Amino acid sequence: MAGGQHHHRTNLDKYHPGYFGKVGMRHFHMLKNHYWKPSVNLDKLWTLVPAETREKYLSPSAMKSDTAPVVDLLPLGYAKLLGKGRLPEVPIIVKARYVSKLAERKIKEAGGTIVLEA
């Protein structure tokens, strides 16, 4: 197409992607599971705890207890914990593959801990 590589380039890139074939670098032997990293935010963390356990730990009488629920994110389908949202001031133990700095800070402020697992 006339001007496709020059003055009509934006139109072709926007409305006809792939018209000129391949671009960029190749990744030999690409394994997609190496990039598997679904994430969950802190505000959804307590929804991953079973309901009866959640009631037990979030009730006012349990606030003084020295036990904490353990949330293992890998069997639940998540690999990374991000720091959006608020946490109740209840200690919680989180097992995850990756954790952001903000999430780590908020969990430690609530009295919990993080266990990194491979």
Image (tube, grey):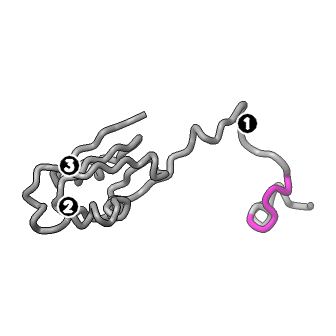
CB contact under 8 Å: marks 3 and 2: no
Question: Which numbered tag is attached to residue 26?
Answer: 1
- Is 17 magenta? The answer is yes
Q: Main secondary structure of the magenta part?
A: loop
Residues 24 and 32: in front is 32
Residue range in magenta is 14-20
Disc number lying in front (1 or 3): 3
Residue 112 shows which numbered tag?
Answer: 3
What residue is rendered at 76% in x and 45% in y?
23
Nearer-N-terminus badge (1/3): 1
The three-letter amino acid code for the residue at tag 3 is: Gly
Circles 1 and 3: CB atoms closer than 8 Å:
no
Q: Disc 2 marks which residue?
A: 57
Q: CA distance from mark 3 to mark 2?
A: 13 Å
Q: Position of residue 27 (x, y in %)?
A: 70, 35
Marks 2,1: beta carbons within 8 A? no
**Of 23 and 89, the residue lying toward us:** 89
Q: Amino acid at mark 1?
A: Arg
Residue 60 is inside the magenta segment: no
Q: Is residue 8 visible?
A: no
38 up-or-down from 35: above or below: below
Indicate the amino acid at tag 2.
Answer: Tyr
CA–CA distance in space, label 2 to label 1: 50 Å
Give residue 75's position: percent from left, percent from top: 46, 47
Residue at image location 68% in from the left, 35% down from the top: 30
Q: Indicate the position of residue 18 as horizontal and vertical percent values.
A: 81, 55
Q: Residues within 10 Å of mark 2 (few under 14, many from 20)?
A: some
Mark before the other along the chain sequence, 2 or 1: 1
Please report whichever mark, 3 or 2, sits nearer to the chain's N-terminal start.
2
Q: Which callout, 2 or 1, points to the residue nearer the camera?
A: 2
Label 3 vs label 2, nearer the camera: 2
